[in-house]
Image: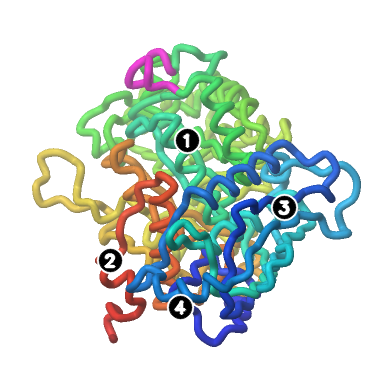
Amino acid sequence: MTRRFLVVATVISAAYALWPLPTDFSTGTAALTLASDFDIDISTIPNPPQDLLDAISRTKGYLQTDQLEALVVDRGASYNQSLQNASSLVSLVLSYDSGVAGEPTSISEEAIDDIDSRVEGYTLTVPEDGSAATIKANSTLGLFRGLTTFGQLWYDLNNTTYTVEAPIAITDSPVFPYRGFMLDTARNYFPVSDILRTLDAMSWVKMTTFHWHMVDSQSFPLEVPEFPELSLNGAYGPSLVYSTNDVQTIVSYANARGIDVLPEIDTPGHTAIIAQAYPEHVACPGATPWATYANEPPAGQLRFANANTTNFTASLISSVSARFPGKYFSTGGDELNTECYAVDESTQADLNTTGKTLEQALDTFTQTVQSVLEDSGKTPVVWEEMVLDFNLTLSNNTIVMVWISSADAAAVADKGFRLVQAPSDYFYLDCGAGGWVGANPSGNSWCDPFKTWQYAYSFDPVANLTDAQAKLVIGGEHLLWTEQSHASNLDSIVWPRAAASAELFWSGPGGNISEALPRLHDVAFRMTQRGVGAIALQPLWCALRPGVCDLTA
């Protein structure tokens, strides 16, 4: 699979900074300013959804407050004369294409539709003579994506908002429907405000999924009203808990920005913290040496061979999943340590009583938990071990996260499951930060080296797959495991690196890194203007001189 966009202009200027790159577009060389009374017209849309009205308001706000100078040596001063004589754009008209009939649905509703049913395409035109610009789409979500692109077209010079590339014509839609970011909020807690800011940044690069790894062995920061002891005993503190209202806030905020929330309760591994509230359900809790019984401290895993534990887990998953309106829910399934069960007398007794092997007991557990999700209309999501390491009966609708290695995608696809590309060798943002385990001065992170945006951008999600297997790839995501991250460094670790996969899975693989870098500089600078602490990719001297700092320059 290769990119399918058409660039009509022969040279992309440093000012051209759309991200992700549209499918088809053309630009001119005329200057155009934004009128002081510029407005967005939705008069053709009957009963516009409130979240579309809110998106329009945010877009107008960004146009006023971005005040981003062009990333060229003179910061756009040489455009001054042409701007004096330029036409001014007074209005942007939003409308549905003829394919939309009846009451419009909201961005929030469309964001949580079946992954294969979401319609994100749009067309955008900006004439050079000042006549109305237009965005047309067959969905409200598509209109929102078009607004996002429109907001990236403009720069500021002496309080004049302008482009020097009119006329502009864009026809755009994504190659892959799943474009995500995963955040682990269990190793370290992140305030709701940090998550909301992250969702904003995700929306600016057209991501579709916030994969929320909510709990793990270290903490259980999620309030579950049916199981209050879990957060009471498992959170780092009473103020470090995501309340039911917090969850509703995060989900609503995400959905209104075209983002589905994929919640994850990892089972049966990574569950040591549950022993703080329900010790009867956890094998080898706190066992030492921890490295024998777990991938990370503390040790402890659900006693899935026990019927009471299986029912407890199914009830927990049912309770949590009911609070998320999306159609997907992850039950995890990674890094199961069998040695933990070998030394657990309770598990061995249950296996002897039932006559099952450990794998057969895991199969029963998994089927029970997944049936709860499917009965409520949700699609299960699991990590790759549930498919590759164990012989389990999984629903054919199950989506599999490929994480251990990009080389594992073919094996997952060969079993007929849809998959998300999340390989640690390309998309783990925590790699390369050095070892975090104590008493290990020469330790490195297990997934060294650091994964640069360039390396992630070079990933081909369908490499070494047959045509039939490639059709099972629904997209991919960047991931942040937070052993060494919290609120103080969230932005700098994630942005703008995670934008690399956002473009990769929107525009398709095969992008030119040298051409992408000036645009990604622009993403980072614009994010900074909007309050996200994105890091610098290069010295400013390089950012203002595209290509000059390439290795081959």
Q: Is residue 410 visible?
A: no
| Residue plotted at (87% across, 42% down) | 103
Residue 216 placement (x, y as % from top left): 40, 32
**Location of mark 1 (residue):** 266
Name the residue nearer the viewer: 446 or 221. 221
Q: Earlier in the sequence, mark 4 or mark 1?
A: 1
Figure quadrant of residue 110: top right
Q: Earlier in the sequence, mark 3 or mark 1?
A: 3
Disc sitting over residue 512 in the figure: 4
What kind of element bears circle 2?
helix
What kind of element bears circle 4?
loop
In the image, 124: left or right of 205?
right
Q: Earlier in the sequence, mark 2 or mark 4?
A: 4
Q: Count neighbours of disc 3 (C-alpha within 10 A) and say few if under 14, some if 14 to 19, many if 20 or more.
A: some
What kind of element bears circle 1?
loop
Figure quadrant of residue 238: top left
Disc sitting over residue 118 in the figure: 3
Give the spatial CA distance, label 2 vs label 1.
Answer: 42 Å
Give the spatial CA distance, label 2 vs label 4.
Answer: 21 Å
Q: Earlier in the sequence, mark 2 or mark 3?
A: 3
Above or below: residue 25 compared with residue 443: below
Give the spatial CA distance, label 4 vs label 1.
Answer: 37 Å
**Location of mark 2 (residue):** 540
Residue 126 placement (x, y as % from top left): 67, 68
In the image, 132: left or right of 439?
right
